[in-house]
Image: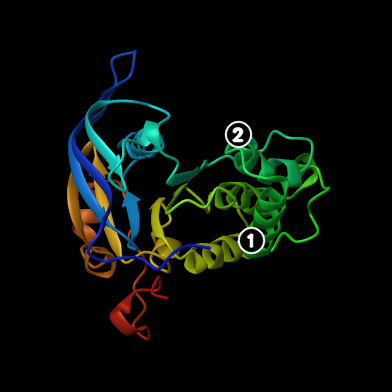
Amino acid sequence: MNDRPHADRTAVNVKDLSFLYPDGTHALDSLSLTIKDGQSVCLAGPNGAGKSTLLLVLAGLLQGEGMVTIDGVAPQANRQLGLVFQDADDQLFCPTVGDDVAFGPRNQRLSAAEVALRVKESLAATGMNGFEKRSAHHLSGGEKKRAAIAAVLACRPSVLALDEPWANLDARGAHAVTQIMRDFGGTRLVTSQDLFRAAQVCERMLILDHGQLVADGPMQQLLQNRDLLVQHGLQPIPRCPKCEGGLRGEA
């Protein structure tokens, strides 16, 4: 559903980004980072580090001070980044799953045939075939999450951003979401406290704390630095002597 990534192209560019909430909370503080096309990145950090705020800015739902571009264009001017909220109920509001998945393509003023094609492809990509007429209110937590992802995929984003995608899911639902993320052909940006599952998807980790970038490197390398993880409110993955690399979270 996505073009082949170009490793030399910048997908996400953030420079000197700051964001202050009306109550005075400084969520982002002169944050700068770049993500290359096709990279899979875990955005980690303690609660209140600014992770969700950053995703909202990247999606164009909030606007801070500084420069932000997605594929070279300001977030408010394009739809190249698709954001999946932590709570699927915040994203599913139509009478049926099919309507939810069709909502974005319809707003893009696509033809009825193209909308139908995207609904079909997105539901197939998330294992939700046959759910078109179902109400989201009657779905399980894992099914709701997959329906929310399908609704985002239907808009054909080049960057898929997911806020705590494994939160409150059982093992089966979490595995299904992991597989969907692996199958996505574009750039992936994931906020998560679950480093075990994030390590199965992401190759790079960015650690935020108090709105600032405090670490950036290969996911498996940073996972070995237990002192760094603990210092910034993250739970290290238990060591596994029989696993290559010694970490249970490796794919």
**At 42% from the left edge and 54% from the top edge, which residue is drawn?**
158
Query: With respect to residue 137, does 113 lie above or below?
Result: below
Q: Earlier in the sequence, mark 1 or mark 2?
A: 2
The answer to whether 251 appears left or right of 96 in the picture is left
Image quadrant holding the C terminus, namely: bottom left
Left or right for 107, reference 51 = right
Of 111 and 34, nearer the camera is: 111
Q: Amino acid at mark 2?
A: Asp
Local packing at callout 1 (Cα closer than 10 Å; few below 14, some 14-19, many 20+) is many
Query: Residue tagged by mark 2?
Result: 90
The mark lying in front, picked from 1 and 2, is 1
Helix, strand or loop at disc 2? helix
Residue 160, label in figure: none
Q: Residue at x 36, y 36 (%)?
A: 75
Q: Position of residue 151 (x, y in %)?
A: 62, 47
Residue 165 image point, x, y percent: 51, 51
Say which amino acid is labelled 1.
Answer: Thr
Residue at the spot of label 1: 126
Mark 2 Cα-neighbour bin, 10 Å: few <14, some 14–19, many ≥20: few
Please provide percent x and percent y for residue 51: 34, 40
The answer to whether residue 210 shows anywhere in this view is no
Front residue of 100/142: it is 100
- Residue for point 34% across, 33% down: 48
| Residues under numbered marks 1 and 2 in contact, where contact means CB atoms less than 8 Å apart | no
